[in-house]
Amino acid sequence: MNNYSQYLPLLKISLQKLDNWRDGYGADHQTDFIEHLEKSSIQSVLDELAEKLQGNYPFHHPQYAGQMLKPPHPVAWLAYSLAMTINPNNHALDGGPPTSEMEKEVVNLIAAMAGYENNYLGHLTSGGTIANLEALFIAREIHPDKSIAATANAHYTHKRMCRILNCNFLEIPVDQHGIPDLSFIETHAEEIGTLVVTLGTTGLGIIEPLDELMNLSHKYGFRVHADAAYGGFFKLIENELPSEKHWKKLSECDSVVIDPHKHGLQPYGCGAILFKDASVGKYYKHDSPYTYFTSDDLHLGEISIECSRAGAAAAALWATLQMLPLTSNGLGEILRKTRSAAVTFAGLLQNRPDWQLYNTPELDITGYFKVPESGTISELNKQSKHIFSAGMKNRDTGFHLSLFKVKAEDFVKKFPDYRADVPEAVLLRSVFMKEEHEGFVEELTDRIFSA
Ligand SMILES: *Cc1c(COP(=O)(O)O)cnc(C)c1O
């Protein structure tokens, strides 16, 4: 997948088609940008850019298992590039009729994956944060006098968004395994309007126990929002996951966020929000004098917080899903490989007395550390930081991980033999989110073990 230039001939053929379409409106009014520029100067600008871009870490390579980053599927790139020469805007049907149709089509597929039936409402967003903001906005509109609750492991933006929405945020404590304190929720149930449940925490990919939390929702009547920005597409292989029973409850959630730009192979600028009950559309109501109405159909701009959004993002996702449908054997096959890489990695680590796994991977993320001889957290931290930096020294034999902090008090609950001589434990963390990780994980482990 790394060699993008090999796909250019395909793009050229399709671009030619669009050029002909443009010419069909008459060639005489077109500005030829190139006419005013030396081709050689464009080349030199692009070369300088290519030079600068090499300052990135190798996100494309399986030696990179640091943060949630990977290049898009080549088809997503081609489709995005093609569509953006027109630059349609999906804020309204008239801003780009074909890409708006594609958006409805792909959102329908994501909704079907989540288990939502006909009466849902949903659209793409520029990302997971905005998608969550829409969910929390509706949460506040429905229960203006109640709190929005989420665990300490929820994405940090939920708390901040509650400040934006001027809505009280209630943090639910979790134990050392990331399990929310259910009795705390019961004690505060009257106060909670909407509970945010994260399916795949950003830190360690933990699946919060939606099954039990949904039972509490039925008992006490609060709403449930599923933040599956990272984990959502794992729904495709739910039967193979230890968290299967929680995924089965996804369709009961009042709203769901899934990011195609996380595990859907899309370039950044593609999140998705779905509401189980389409009647929440009334809270978005506006009547802008600017929006031009030439059809009576629902305008995407009427059911979203954002106005302008890239039609090209919908085109890219649409094209990708033609190649990789939302099935266990389509996109699911890629997720199966990423998870398999994490499980293999965890197994290799467990065979070593000098390494310790912090969490068994539920998805494709693991936390771990090298066992410190002194049994102190301070030494453990020093080792983690050393290994983290050592990996980045050599291009061809190196590796990229990330560091992950946990409270020392939680750490010693899991590992009581350790001495908490500092307030935080710094773990190593690997995100195996590329399918290429599956074939590279032994090599990667060797490199890490010998660092
Ligand atoms: C990444 C992530 C977000 C934020 O989404 P962006 O697309 O980065 O804005 C929210 N929640 C979870 C669980 C995430 O992993």
Image: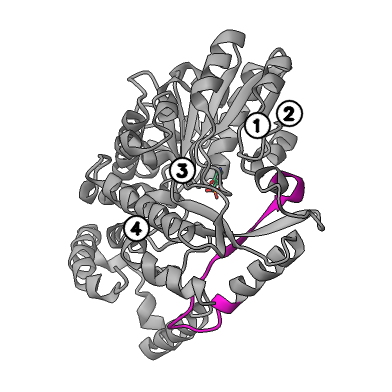
Foreground disc of the pair 4, 1:
1
Disc 4: which residue: 80
> Residue 150, which numbered label?
1
User: Was residue 444 drawn as part of the magenta stretch in this picture?
Assistant: no
Q: Are marks 2 and 1 in contact (CB under 8 Å)?
A: yes
The part of the chain drawn in magenta is 390-410
Query: Residue type at mark 2?
Result: Leu
- Residue occupying image coordinates x 25% and y 60%: 22
Q: Is residue 125 above or below residue 383?
A: above
Q: Is residue 41 above or below residue 171?
A: below
Query: Residue type at mark 3?
Result: Glu
Disc 3: which residue: 362
Which circle's residue, 1 or 3, is located before the other in the chain? 1
> Residue 170, which numbered label?
2
Foreground disc of the pair 2, 3:
3
Q: CA distance from mark 2 to mark 4?
A: 40 Å
42 or 51: nearer the viewer: 51
- Residue occupying image coordinates x 48% and y 38%: 228
Q: CA distance from mark 4 to mark 1?
A: 35 Å
* Left or right of residue 446: residue 172: right
- Residue occupying image coordinates x 54% and y 48%: 359
Which element carries disc 2, helix, strand or loop? strand
Query: Residue type at mark 1?
Result: Ala
Which circle's residue, 4 or 3, is located before the other in the chain? 4
